[in-house]
Image (cartoon, helix red, strand yellow):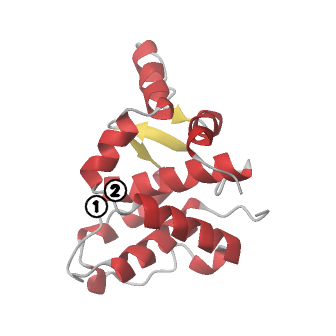
Amino acid sequence: MKNITQAIDVAEFILDWHQKKSVDETVCLLPSYFQALLYYCQGYHLALNNTPLFNDTIILKDNEPFIETVGEIYYPLLKVPYQEIPKSENRGNINALNQEQNEFVDEVLNVIGQFSMWKIKEMSLKETPIMTAQANIANIANEPTNNAITQQSMKEYFINYVVKY
């Protein structure tokens, strides 16, 4: 998996995946759930492949993983049911992911996507990358906040939950 994509491309894949899996076409994908799915895709990719799926920085915002470029483009779209989401050239490109990346993201989504948004939030708050970013914010009073969830912390955490084959 040498091709590193952009987070918006993976986001587009997630939106498409969720739309296909949803029984109710009037359901909206909640922004925090959307961002958490990106976080898990990145974490497992780092652990299994020793490379990022995308280079965009994940930060901690309101105690949740957040990618600014994804939020800017997709948050307005996530407020409407799927069938009403307008096409836009600003959105990501599913075709930017190669076959291996498609299969990888699909597999992560099939596992993590079975959990509710509330369960994912509960899980992520107990994970070292999130807790480390929270501690960094708490330790930097009146100074620029270092709220990045580092790729290194994600890799070190998620490596404990994968089986290489």
Query: Separation of disc 2 and disc 1 at Cα?
Result: 5 Å
Circle 1: is it few (<14), some (14-19), or many (20+) Cα within 10 Å? Answer: few
Q: Which one is in front, 148 or 42?
A: 42
Q: Which of the image's four quarters has the N terminus? A: bottom right
To which residue does mark 1 refer? 30
Question: Is 131 on the left-hand or right-hand side of 80?
Answer: right
Residue 139: x and y in percent read 45, 13
Residue 119: x and y in percent read 28, 48
- Amino acid type, mark 1: Leu
Q: Is residue 123 in sight in this rendering?
A: yes
To which residue does mark 2 refer? 33
Q: Is residue 71 in sight in this rendering?
A: no
Please, is residue 140 above or below residue 65 in the view?
A: above
Please, is residue 147 above or below residue 137 in the view?
A: below
Residue 105: x and y in percent read 56, 66
Circle 2: is it few (<14), some (14-19), or many (20+) Cα within 10 Å? Answer: many
Rendering quarter of residue 135: top left
